[in-house]
């Protein structure tokens, strides 16, 4: 198998059932309600950008998608799993949904190759040769085919984040989540990570990304979702950012954040 | 006042000295791995176990860490014998040392486990690794890699602690020294030599353990960066 | 208690008194020698660092019972018939000075270098820098590990049993030889040690957490 699978899902775009469906999803941390009834769908092949101020609930919404945060009320379907029902096989879900974090979270005691192949070997039970082949393929995709044997600390932040992307790709996910993946990076390293994500998007990967990079969101996303105070405040294509309908989004775009 | 050393006893008692050294080494080697395993298990139990298990493990760790090894050994050797569970001096010594090492390693390993950033565990979870796989592939190697210098110091302290075992007639190096001085009446000379032998053993053990660490932690070997 | 007569219990308590005395002597002696060791270990002079490091490595590489023997037999060859208490106290002093010296050296080094630089820029002399800036900060972080080491001192004073010093451990051993009730005797002895050590451990742990919180 090569990266064909990504293209397969792209061809299904529009016809197949959505990969993610939020229906009135609420999420509270103690007394604090962070999500106040979210409705949202992500179709196969679609790229959705969640934007909004910090505290708007966008990261929480993202983390709900692969059940890092259990939802408090409402319904959430992801890749055919009903996360609002008890007894969901989380490990099965997570083989379909990859996530990349702001802080990379690479395993520092493992080399780049080992980071990428750990889960495929342990979970998918690939043998050494298959794992190696897989590693060189996904690392080439993120432009790091030559750094297989380096340790994370030997790489720049941008390179580490690209390894983290490759690590997720190695599980052949149907859906990729990106949680402010460039926020911890210096501006000059941001570009290399965004280029990789842009390439994946062009290849047809379904993805949901929380980002502060407005220009990037406008350029890559099929759908931009502006979240405000735990609600979907406004959504539409990338053009929406040029022509906001609400005062809040106008202010948000205007503030340059 | 001049004192003339007389080290001739080394020649006449070389067989005894060797057997003492061997026993000291055996006591040490037989203790390290089981003690480390026990300690790691206790560290995990103390962090993640059910409440009753946490209580038991905490009681064990604090009980051992706040009482002397000699008393523990006496308790085990003499006390259990009276209760009907008679064990030989050598097994009693090894058991006491393992129990002791377990309690100290548990606290060291707990610090190691707690130093692993939460995000890494989250990442492991998101890669669909099972808890067991996370423990073996991520938590254990990293925790050990972070705290191995403390572990090495602890294992050396434990090697030194074997010197008390002659109290229950396990004739390790210190015990052999006592026998020799009771025959030669050269207590000072004998124990100066014994001290030097321990110094050599401690140095040797430190080198050996560092060697093992370098073998076990590839990143350490490659980059020389203990965290 | 546990089948022990009041006299026997009193015998153990007497031993406990000697354990406390020996521990105190070991700690005081260890402080008197350990402080210079700590200073030498963190000194500018390479020569001082070498010598003190050798001392520490030597003491830390030899078991305490062997140090007890060396001192016990060593002092007596000069014709002094030493009591076991004196020999044990000297041995405990040597032992604790090496460990305390190493602990305190770590605390001195833990004070950020910028603190000394700042003090220097205020035109304080080197001793003034040390007394008014470095030492007060080092002392604070030194409290938990020092108290923690006190536990080691109390526990390891039991090694004086090898030279026949009449501490708690030796009392328990003697009592057991007479009564053959090891389970009761060593349980009580362990409880007595625990009663001394655990509060110290607890204090060290609490204080360390407090320091960690104030640093965060």
Image (tube, grey):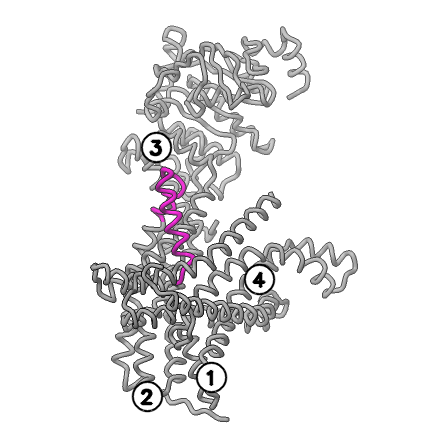
Vertical side of C207 occupied by B86: above or below: below
Q: Chain of mark 1?
A: C
The quadrant in which residue B22 appears is: bottom left
Q: Chain of mark 4?
A: C
Q: Chain of mark 3?
A: B
**Is B100 left, or right, of C59 in this rendering?**
left
Task: Name the residue beneath numbered marker 4.
Answer: C104
Q: Tell whether label 2 touches label 4 (CB within 8 Å).
A: no
Label 4 crowding class (10 Å Cα cut-off): few <14, some 14-19, many 20+?
many
Same chain under badges 2 and 1? The reply is no
**Is B186 left, or right, of C147 in this rendering?**
left
- Is residue C62 shown to the viewer in this render? no
- Tell me the CA gap for discs 4 and 2: 41 Å
Which residue is painted at 58% across and 57% down in the image?
C143
Q: Which residues are magenta?
A: B40-68
Vertical side of B72 occupied by C62: above or below: below
- Tell me the CA gap for discs 3 and 2: 65 Å
Which residue is painted at 59% across and 33% down in the image?
A186
Question: Label for residue B129?
Answer: 3
The residue lying toward the viewer, choosing from A40 and A47, is: A40
Task: Name the residue beneath numbered marker 1.
Answer: C82
Task: Name the residue beneath numbered marker 2.
Answer: B184
- Tell me the CA gap for discs 2 and 1: 20 Å
- Tell me the CA gap for discs 1 and 4: 31 Å
SS at mark 1?
loop
């Amino acid at each position: 198998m090569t990266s064909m699978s990504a293209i397969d899902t792209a061809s299904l775009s529009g016809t197949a059932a959505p990969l993610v469906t939020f229906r009135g999803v609420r999420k509270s941390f103690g007394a604090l309600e962070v999500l106040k009834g979210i409705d949202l769908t992500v179709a196969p092949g679609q790229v959705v950008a969640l934007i909004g101020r910090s505290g708007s609930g966008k990261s929480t919404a993202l983390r709900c998608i692969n059940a890092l945060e259990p939802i408090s009320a409402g319904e959430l379907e992801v890749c055919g799993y009903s996360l609002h029902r008890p007894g969901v096989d989380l490990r099965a879900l997570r083989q379909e949904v990859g996530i990349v974090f702001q802080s990379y979270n690479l395993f520092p005691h493992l080399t780049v190759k080992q980071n990428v192949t750990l889960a495929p070997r342990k979970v998918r039970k690939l043998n050494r040769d298959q794992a190696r082949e897989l590693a060189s393929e996904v690392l080439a995709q993120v432009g790091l085919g030559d750094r297989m044997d380096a340790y994370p600390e030997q790489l720049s932040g941008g390179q580490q984040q690209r390894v983290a992307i490759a690590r997720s790709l190695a599980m052949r996910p149907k859906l990729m989540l990106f949680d402010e993946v460039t926020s911890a990076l210096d501006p000059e390293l941001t570009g290399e990570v965004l280029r990789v994500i842009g390439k994946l998007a062009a290849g047809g990967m379904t993805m949901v990304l929380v980002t502060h990079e407005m220009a990037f969101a406008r350029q890559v996303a099929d759908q931009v979702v502006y979240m405000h105070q735990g609600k979907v405040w406004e959504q539409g294509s990338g053009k929406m950012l040029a022509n906001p309908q609400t005062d809040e989004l106008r202010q948000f775009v205007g503030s340059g954040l | 006042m001049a004192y003339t050393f007389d080290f001739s006893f080394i020649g006449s008692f070389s067989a005894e000295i060797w057997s003492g050294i061997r026993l000291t080494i055996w006591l040490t080697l037989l203790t390290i791995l089981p003690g480390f395993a026990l300690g790691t298990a206790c560290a995990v139990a103390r962090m993640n176990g059910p409440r009753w298990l946490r209580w038991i493990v905490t009681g064990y760790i604090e009980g051992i860490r706040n009482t002397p090894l000699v008393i523990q050994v006496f308790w085990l050797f003499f006390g259990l014998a009276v209760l009907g569970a008679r064990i030989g001096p050598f097994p009693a010594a090894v058991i006491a040392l393992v129990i002791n090492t377990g309690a100290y390693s548990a606290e060291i390993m707990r610090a190691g486990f707690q130093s692993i950033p939460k995000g890494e565990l989250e990442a492991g979870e998101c890669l669909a690794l099972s808890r067991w796989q996370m423990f073996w592939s991520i938590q254990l190697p990293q925790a050990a890699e972070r705290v191995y210098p403390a572990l090495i110091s602890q294992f050396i302290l434990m090697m030194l602690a074997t010197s008390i075992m002659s109290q229950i007639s396990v004739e390790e190096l210190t015990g052999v020294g006592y026998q020799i001085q009771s025959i030669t009446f050269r207590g000072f000379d004998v124990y100066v030599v014994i001290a030097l032998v321990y110094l050599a053993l401690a140095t040797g053990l430190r080198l050996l353990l560092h060697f093992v660490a370098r073998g076990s932690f590839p990143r350490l070997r490659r980059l020389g960066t203990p965290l | 208690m546990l089948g022990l007569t009041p006299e026997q219990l009193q015998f153990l308590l007497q031993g406990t008194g000697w354990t406390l005395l020996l521990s105190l002597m070991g700690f005081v002696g260890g402080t008197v020698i350990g402080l210079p060791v700590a200073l030498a270990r963190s000194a500018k002079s390479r020569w001082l660092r070498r010598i003190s490091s050798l001392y520490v490595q030597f003491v830390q590489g030899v078991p305490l019972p062997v140090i007890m023997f060396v001192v016990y037999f060593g002092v007596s060859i000069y014709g002094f018939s030493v009591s076991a208490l004196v020999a044990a106290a000297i041995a405990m002093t040597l032992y604790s000075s090496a460990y305390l010296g190493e602990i305190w050296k770590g605390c001195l080094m833990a004070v950020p270098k910028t603190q000394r630089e700042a003090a220097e820029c205020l035109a304080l002399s080197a001793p003034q820098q040390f007394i008014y800036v470095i030492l007060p900060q080092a002392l604070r972080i030194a409290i938990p590990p020092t108290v923690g080491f006190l536990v080691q001192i109390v526990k390891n004073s039991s090694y004086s049993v090898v030279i026949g010093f009449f501490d708690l451990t030796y009392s328990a051993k003697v009592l057991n030889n007479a009564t053959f009730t090891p389970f009761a005797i060593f349980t009580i002895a362990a409880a007595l040690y625990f009663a001394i050590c655990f509060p110290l451990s607890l204090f060290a742990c609490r204080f360390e957490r407090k320091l960690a919180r104030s640093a965060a």
